[in-house]
Image (tube, rainbow, N blue to C red):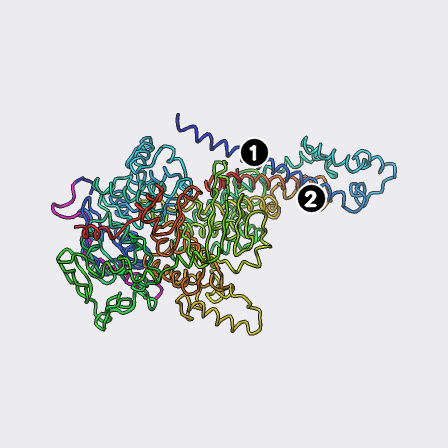
Amino acid sequence: MSGPADGPAGEPLLVVDGLDVTFQVGGERVHAVRDVSFTLDRGECLAIVGESGSGKSVTARTLIGLTGGRSTVRARRLSFDGTDLTALTEARWRAVRGRHIGLVLQDALVSLDPLRTVGAEVAEPLHVHRLAARDEVAGRVTGTLADVGVPDPARRARQYPHQLSGGLRQRALIASAIAAGPRLLLADEPTTALDVTVQAQVLDLLRRLRQEGLALLLISHDLAVVAGLADRIAVMYGGLVVEGGPAEQVLRDPRHPYTRALLAAAPALHTRGLHTRGLHTRGSQLAVPVPWRPGAGPGGCPYAARCRLADERCRTELPTPAEADPEHRVLCWHPVPSPDPASPVGPGVLAVDEPPPPAHVPTGGVPTEVTRSEVLLDVDGLSRRFRGPGGAWQHAVDNVSFQLRAGETLGVVGESGSGKTTVARIVLGLLAPDAGTVRFAGVRWNGDGVLERDRRPHRRRMQAVQQDPLSSFDPRYTVERIVGEAVAGTRRRGGRRARRDRVAGLLDQVGLGANLLGRRPRDLSGGQRQRVTIARALAPAPELLVCDEPVSALDVSIQAQILDLLADLQRDLGVTMLFISHDLAVIHQVSDRLLVMQDGRIVESGELGQVFAQPAHLYTRELLAAVPRPAEPTARTMAR
Amino acid sequence: MRAVGPVRRRERTLLRAAGRRLAGAAAVVLGAATLAFAALQLLPGDPVAVLLGPATSASPQVREQIRADFGFDEPLPVRYLHYLGQLVTGDLGRSYQRQQPVTTLIGEQLWPTVQLVAASVTLAVVVAVVSAVVTTGRRSALRTLVELVELVALSTPHFWLGIVLLTVFSFRLHVFPAAGAQDLAALVLPAVTLALPVAGVLAQVLREGIETALEQPFVVAARARGRSRLGVRLRHAVRHAAAPLLTLTGWATGSLLGGAVLVETVFGRPGLGSLTLQAVTSRDLPVVLGVVLLSATAVVVLFTLVDLAQLALDPRLRTAAAL
């Protein structure tokens, strides 16, 4: 299989027919991938979209013979370039991996060996497959790095992964996957850990590679990310492809309730910048009433537990493919009907993206109230320098000032290195500024010689919600202890019982049942963990919540739920929020006002709608332009 | 020669790091020397009496003469500076018992011990790496067996293992000599005796390290480039597991240098062990001090080397603060 020809005439490069993957986990058999079929040809891009546990990554790993664990792979047909992949021995698989099929994973910081130079990693497939003589390797490596758009490739090749920026690292990882010239590239969440503008660049690179003839299988939890790149989209849920077809059709005319919910959950930018807070339009569609397990409901539709349209038949009988047309297949008993040709935009699709009816605007008259309320947080002229890797001083935060009024949410958006997290740490009083002051609720809070001793009595009034709850919890603590720790007055009489009730109440407030009290962080899903973090932050009844990337580690569908929860909490409790994110779309969901940070400075600030509608600064425009939009095909249709 | 620049720069930074660590090491050795000197001063009794031994009776004039010869009548700071001066010039004083310079005595006995320790540590590392690399990642009968052997090995006392090996290979099979240090064959049994328990510990630590490394995403990426299971272990995972292994090996080498005494006794080998034993039993303080200083220096040098090896191994440690 080394010739340039694409196998037998008329046969696609990759044929997957009836793929089934099961894992033996303990005494249980988990059906991770069920009857998945697709084909992929040179220069084509198929995107598999689904949330964690949907089987999308397992599908990709199976195609490179690394399903792993105690797995069983079955397929009616699994062929690449005419070779039957199911019959390959481990030794023959090794000849295929890297040479004919490449794999790119999420987060190159851990997907490139941190102890080896970038060049050594890119050279690895050349060495393994003996594709270059010893003295040619360096040239081939710099050539490949240059190909994927790494500037100064010879120098970069000698550096280590941690010395490169996230975007360069991801490019280097892609270079290591394509160095041996494979014809199929499997990209598993290749942009998930990246800032939006960097994500856009990496997607551009993948698009170019595809145009050069590479077949691309793109795996993502985010429909918006794949929208601009995929020729065809397969939406997976519970191991099944629930909907599949040409990208344009799936995005414009989603037939499966899950696809529609996913599209709605993607935190797209409402073009007019209107606030949908509290309207309950997004997360509710994807809410999970009970923890769903792949093994549940053997015969039924796996989505039935979450589907609003589900009936008895859905729960007991697996749907047969309903073919709208032979290209666009939907696995559902109640596919959403195709839109009336007279009105090309289905009402269901736009129900979410549409600005709320004008009637809602007066009721959401938050800004006027806000301007009247007192200033809760006053940040004045903050600066903070750090010593960079080269030993030179760098400004992480440079003369940053802003005010936050009680009951308001201020969004701070910026990419890695913009200084937004340093601002958060100074506001939280975890780091002293070099210059400038922070006043919180009328108290001198940070800077100008304020000591932790002075802050301590007021600490409970300001709480933090971090990005990665798994690492901010003690893994040995139960949920009850994690949240209970933050409940004040635990040593009082009747403490134990009262504390338990209070913790249960807090969990209820964030939409978790008391049955989770005894669980440990590891046994919780990502969304549940983030809810526990929020419950913990709410425990001392704070006036200000500082949320630093609170949804970045979550799937889009879970993100939507957490954002809705935060919006609800703010409305019900009147808590003030400083909300930090690299994702404009996320900021958009919760904020009243917006600060845009770049290189430690505030480059733009203002009311949310105004900034989105008329971004003044070039950088803000770049950020806005880089946000992937699933609704683009829709917009085109509307324009016709 | 474009490639030379950064490489040379990296070597320079590593050299600078080595220099700073050696300066620190020298300070530690000075501290050890001072502590040893202080201990000597705090020792109860008259040094002359110690020097002469309990059974000797000497006239006050003779005692006074000895006191002057050894400089015991000088004030404390003068003696301390004199002692340091001697150390710097490599003079560790003279043995009370043998009336020879301590450096000569140690020099004679140093080589057999260094030979033994070097052979043992090398053997232990090789056995540990092979055993860990071959048996990681798979639940098999072989692995269970190997882990059991390691457990037995690491919990076996050296002297007992030595006696067993002697009985089997020297007295029964006559493969290796039972005593002496005349040739390499005589080195085998003592080296194995010292190596096996250490190998047991190292193998377990290394296996755990490799298994942690094998769970990292970069392992999947490497396998997706076509690396075999064994290749991933050797090219990627072992390096990640090497950090704790290095630290442990440094510690093991240091403790073997001091702990070789039992094995040297069992196998009748000359070496620092027997020298120390004699010096301690006969209260030959200059020799004891010399051995203490040598051990301190050896341990400090070893840990400096381990520290530098960690820097060479893991680029992420090469921060401005570490260099």
Residue sticking out furthest to the top = B1
Decide which of B140, A584 is in the foreground and name it. Answer: A584
Left or right? Give the position of A246 relative to B177.
Answer: left
Q: Which residues are drawn in magenta?
A: A5-33
Residue that numbered label 2 is attached to = B278
Q: In the image, is residue B130 part of the stretch drawn in magenta?
A: no
Quarter occupied by the N terminus of chain A:
top left
Quadrant in which residue A126 is drawn: top left
Amino acid at pointer 2: Gln
Q: Is residue B213 above or below residue A477?
A: above
Q: Is residue B10 visible?
A: yes
Residue that numbered label 1 is attached to = B19
**Are the residues under marks 2 and 1 on the same chain?**
yes
Q: Name the front one of labels 2 and 1.
A: 1
Left or right? Give the position of B279 relative to A332.
Answer: right
Q: Residues within 10 Å of mark 2 (few under 14, many from 20)?
A: some
Quadrant in which residue B94 is drawn: top right
2 or 1: tag closer to the N-terminus: 1
Q: In the image, is residue A23 part of the stretch drawn in magenta?
A: yes
Q: Is residue B199 above or below residue A309?
A: above
Q: Mark 1 — on which chain does it sit?
A: B
Quadrant in which residue B16 is drawn: top right
Badge 2 marks a residue whose secondary structure is helix
Decide which of A553, A561 is in the foreground and name it. Answer: A561
Q: Mark 2 — on which chain does it sit?
A: B
